[in-house]
Image (cartoon, rainbow, N blue to C red):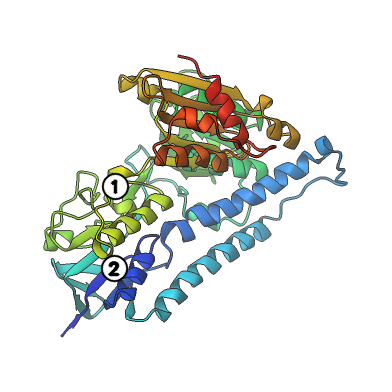
Amino acid sequence: MTRPFDCIVIGAGQAGPPLAGRLAGAGMTVAMIERKLFGGTCVNTGCIPTKALVASAHAAHVARRSADFGVAIRGGVEIDMPAVKARKDKVSTAARNGVESWLRKMDRCTVFEGQARFESPTEVRVGGELLSASRIFINVGGRASIPSMPGVDSVKLLTNTSILELDAVPRHLVVVGGSYVGLEFAQMYRRFGAQVTVVEKGPRLVGREDEDVSDAIREILEAEGIGMRLAAECIAFRPSGTDIVVGVDCQTGDREVVGSHVLLAVGRRPNTDDLGLERAGVQTDGRGYIRVDEQLQTNVTGIWALGDCNGRGAFTHTAYNDFEIVAANLLDGEMRRVSDRIEAYALYIDPPLGRVGLSVAQATAAKRKVRVGKRPMTRVGRAVEKGETQGFMKVVIDAESDAILGAAILGVGGDEAIHAVIDTMAAHRTAGQLQRTVHIHPTVAELIPTVIGEATP
């Protein structure tokens, strides 16, 4: 027997629950299917637990630097890793329970727990029940990618999910992957007291950023004692007693790194391989991402894909914006598109990197004539007052139209200050207009107009 609904939402990540709320609020009956943990990646294995750990690591770092601020701590700083993990778990669990409670109490929404699989373009099976709806929304997220590397199956590797279960500080953590996820874990565990080495296949860290950003990030991490092995041509693994040997085959230095733990942070893959998409006729690309148009509709009428599984964004904020686009188009008579949003994101090392729009390299590759303004954080009053002067601010401006093309703020408060640029770009205002804005003193954001004023070709 088939249970009919107006809509089916598969996955209770960042886009699914608010969409269910809008649909139910509009008078539709909704089936919400979640196979494991409510809240998705952000709540359970992403933003919330990792930033809770980053906060603990930052507290340890500030405590060690207390003498710089005239504060004496007698007896040194100790890390209680079980307590750190317990705090992280408490924060994450509260968020997960909040999402689940909201959904279960929602009028006209029925929650199903189990693996969802398509039976047809309008039918989804979960457990022993067959559900049907004319509108189906896929929000199944992604997981860590485990690429084929020599010896990858011969050792026990950590991912961004399993490393969250550690309740002791590794003796030596080797992080394979010098990008956003890997670097956050590298710094936090270094601050917890582990020896840490980052192994990156490319010639520099976070390769999508401009070289000056990559170099500054490397300098920040190296200053805290994190080892770097870049240009690792052939990464391989093999056990050595209780340790793991990571072959790096770098152009300089030892050809191997021996660690007690290895974190593999080399990318993500979508959770689409067990949905039975072929039975619904839904197309995916070569990496498994569901193909969608500008309104996030798949090639099958009545089926949408939102969040990490559609390949149109890899962040909590882009997943939530996917919900906003679909809800606005379906319920509010709008015609919003994915391409309307401006790419923005952050790297949560300390100090953080806030990024929006194009880098200098991307802008010049697009044949744009640009002006660039740049200021070190050593010349930002708020950073000097807080004793956190690493990094810099940079704004990229179209030399012909005066439009802001992008910005990078690597420094204290950079993840917050960048929003002054994001909002200006979203409002289609010029660099000159932002330059004339009066910001509050003392802040990091108040220097953005100054950086714009100093921009040169």
Badge nearest the viewer, 1 or 2: 1
Q: Label 1: how many residues lie within 10 Å, few (<14), some (14-19) or many (20+)?
A: some
Q: Which secondary structure, mark 1?
A: helix
Q: Which residue is mark 2?
A: 9
Q: Which secondary structure, mark 2?
A: strand
Displayed quadrant of residue 370: top left
Can residue 215 be seen here? The reply is: no
Q: Looking at this view, name the residue that lies furthest to the bottom.
A: 1
Q: Nearer the viewer, residue 157 or 291?
A: 291
Q: Is residue 28 above or below residue 214?
A: below
Q: Residue at left 59%, top 59%?
A: 88
Horizontal and vertical percent for residue 418? 52, 38
Left or right placement of residue 269 versus residue 188 in this view: left
Horizontal and vertical percent for residue 327? 30, 62
Q: Label 2: how many residues lie within 10 Å, few (<14), some (14-19) or many (20+)?
A: many
**Label 1 sits on what residue type?**
Val
